[in-house]
């Protein structure tokens, strides 16, 4: 199974600015998901976008998916100190019998008050 | 609403000792998963259970065994712990293996000395 690769590895911004993280992958996907992990905690599911979708929104979060470029982006608007966390993309392959969700290594976001 | 509960939260083992990590979910989910998280490696799937009564290997199953005790519980056993198994272990569940986000527990931090 493939792994998504997040870019950048780390990002530091001021409170109120927008944060953009990217995820690239190599083969066909069924869906792509984004998760947040606060330090020392478990992962929290943010958004799932299916291969036939191009954009989804949830509150201050906007996710786009470009299957022709095999990439996705997560935009957090008007960031807050509480958004400080690591963000992971996770790939669900489109292969038959593929039940695994494969995680990237994450982007560490720091929002400075 | 508890979600996914993992026990213990911390554990120190000596090389060669055995232990079982417990995981229980109260969301009536069909599928459950065990991941390990190591610095710089992201999350890697150890084993999963697509439905009650079934278990399958993930990316890094060596040195581990699992039991899907019932629909709620999915345990991970280390028969003879090794320092390479020092990691943070996460249990997760989802309604099925298709297009669903995962709900994660808060993790077990295991150190093998």
Image (tube, helix red, strand yellow):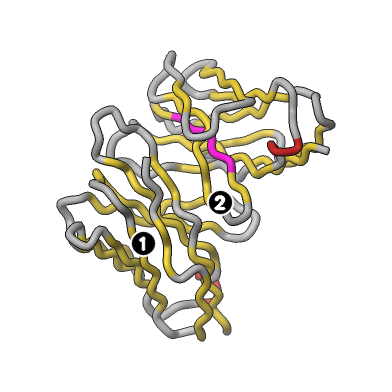
- According to the picture, the residue beneath numbered tag 1 turns out to be A23
**Which one is nearer the viewer's eye here, A8 or A45?**
A8
Please, which chain is the residue tagged with disc 2 on?
Answer: B
In the shown orientation, is residue B88 left or right of residue B97?
A: right
* Residue A12 location (% of width, % of height): 53, 79
* Residue A44 location (% of width, % of height): 47, 52
For the image shown, how many numbered marks are present on the structure? 2
**Which one is nearer the viewer's eye here, B23 or B17?**
B17
Q: Are marks 2 and 1 on the same chain?
A: no
Give above or below for B106 relative to B79: below
Q: Over which residues does the magenta segment extend?
A: B32-36
Q: Secondary structure at mark 1?
A: strand
Name the residue rendered at 31%, 51% in the picture. A32
- According to the picture, the residue beneath numbered tag 2 turns out to be B41
In which image quadrant can residue B78 be found? top right
The majority secondary structure of the magenta stretch comes to strand
Find out whether residue B31 is within the magenta segment.
no
User: Callout 1: 10 Å neighbours few (<14), some, many (20+)?
Assistant: many
Give above or below for B33 relative to A103: above
Name the residue rendered at 52%, 72% in the picture. A10
* Residue B106 location (% of width, % of height): 60, 45
* Residue B19 location (% of width, % of height): 73, 24
In the shown orientation, is residue A7 left or right of residue A58?
A: right
* Cα distance between the residues tagged 2 and 1: 16 Å
Name the residue rendered at 31%, 63% in the picture. A58
């Amino acid at each position: 199974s493939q792994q998504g690769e997040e870019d950048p590895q780390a990002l530091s911004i001021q409170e109120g600015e927008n944060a953009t993280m990217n995820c690239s992958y190599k083969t066909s996907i069924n869906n792509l998901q984004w998760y947040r992990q606060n330090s020392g905690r478990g992962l929290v599911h943010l958004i799932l976008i299916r291969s036939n979708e191009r954009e989804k929104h949830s509150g201050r979060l906007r996710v786009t998916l470009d299957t022709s470029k095999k990439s996705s982006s997560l935009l957090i608007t008007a960031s807050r100190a509480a958004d400080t966390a690591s963000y992971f993309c996770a790939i669900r392959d489109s292969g038959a019998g593929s039940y695994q969700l494969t995680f990237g290594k994450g982007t560490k976001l720091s929002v400075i008050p | 609403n508890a979600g996914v509960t993992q026990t213990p939260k911390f554990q120190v083992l000596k090389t060669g000792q055995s232990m079982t990590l417990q995981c229980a979910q109260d969301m009536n989910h069909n599928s459950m998963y065990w991941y390990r998280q190591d610095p710089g490696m992201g999350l890697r799937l150890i084993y999963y259970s697509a439905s009650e009564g079934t278990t399958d290997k993930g990316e890094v199953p060596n040195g581990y065994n699992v039991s899907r005790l019932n629909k709620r519980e999915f345990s991970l056993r280390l028969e003879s712990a090794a320092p390479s198994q020092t990691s943070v272990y996460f249990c997760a569940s989802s309604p099925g293996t298709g297009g669903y986000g995962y709900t994660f527990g808060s993790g077990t931090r295991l150190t093998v000395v």
